[in-house]
Image: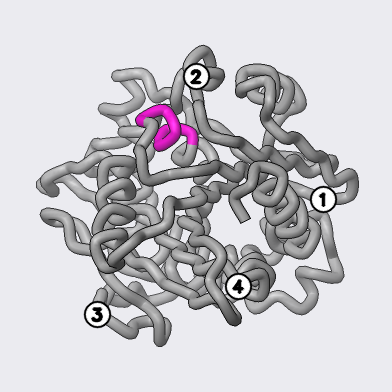
Amino acid sequence: MGLKTIEFVENKQTKGWPYANSEYFTHGDYKLHYRIDAPKGKEKGKMFMIHGFGCDTTFYDEMVVEYTKKGMRCVRVDLPDFGYSTREMKGINYVNRVDMLIELMEYLDKQEQSPDKWIVVGHSMGGSVTLDIADRAPANVKAYMLYAPMFMYNVPPIMSKLFMMKWMGAMMDTALKYVMPYDALVKVVLLIATMSPRYIANYDASKAANPLKLKDTGKGLCYMSAKASHPAYEDMNKIDKPVLLVWGGLDLFVPKSKVNKLSESLPSNTEIHTIPLAGHCVVQNFAKKCSKYGIDFLKGNNLY
């Protein structure tokens, strides 16, 4: 019996698709998918939320519920090659993702008469991107929140060339077509990531699987991997804005040595918490605790 396959679908990239609050920011050949969730009651701040590897805007569903209740406007964005943003391939006019994210924040600021500064939130790979943003020190950011940040691998030139080869992208697309986008597999991965059978039992796996069914996702992941890098540890202590750092005690994705190295590299006034029973995807099944740490952190720095 042959392997079951799925049909790739087109990325429509139009306002209101795939979610009612879906928007697209155009930058050259790119369209970044983002969503804005309004605060409940008076606005007390705004957050720019960046997901991790293999994820998309739905990853922050639980956190958005918690933070909007606390008066936060939440802007969550799909990185290139993930969610419903543009897939990168040979021939695209490449733009560094950090440049695009900073420009998106500036674009959104221009829609306001007196814009507040941003609180940038990053999980896993998104934490690495957040620290890349912090390294640029944009003036319109007032704080950074890192949840289980995981630096991308600095890809050597020979590996970069390998990822950019046509057959590599075709192989990744084939793997996605026959293997990856299935609810059972998604749930297994998320079970390892959250360490919570109860949470995964009620999780709608289609939210995570559907973006993997978009055409050219495999090629895009190869292209992204070819460009992968992370900020230098020695530059981290130069960050001049408040930093919150939250780890999961049962995280199987970030080695303890990396936890210690980053914790020690950040400014000495960084606020650090560990949630003992949390896995890597701490912001999902421990969203209430993560958001409480976030609000207390903002209050402690007179930012809320």
Q: Which mark is residue 68?
A: 4
Residue located at (50% from left, 66% from top): 74
Q: Earlier in the sequence, mark 1 or mark 2?
A: 2
User: Could you give the CA–CA distance between mark 4 and mark 2, rounded to whole angstroms?
Assistant: 31 Å
Secondary structure found at label 2: helix
Closer to the chain start, of discs 1 and 3, is 3
| Quarter residue 33 falls in | bottom left
Report if residue 192 is visible in the image.
Answer: no
Mark 2 Cα-neighbour bin, 10 Å: few <14, some 14–19, many ≥20: few
Q: Return the x and y of residue 187 as percentages of the image width and height.
A: 69, 66
Instruction: Judge whether 82 appears above or below 23 on screen.
Output: above
Disc 3 residue type? Answer: Thr
The image shows residue 167 at horizontal and vertical percentages of 27, 43
- Residue 278's label in the rendered image is 1
Which residue is tagged 3? 14
**Viewer-nearest residue: 176 or 241:** 241
Mark 3 crowdedness (10 Å alpha carbons): few <14, some 14-19, many ≥20:
few
The disc, 4 or 3, on the residue closer to the chain's N-terminal end is 3
Is the residue marked by circle 1 packed among few (<14), some (14-19), or many (20+) residues within 10 Å?
many
**Left or right, 44 with reference to 298:** left
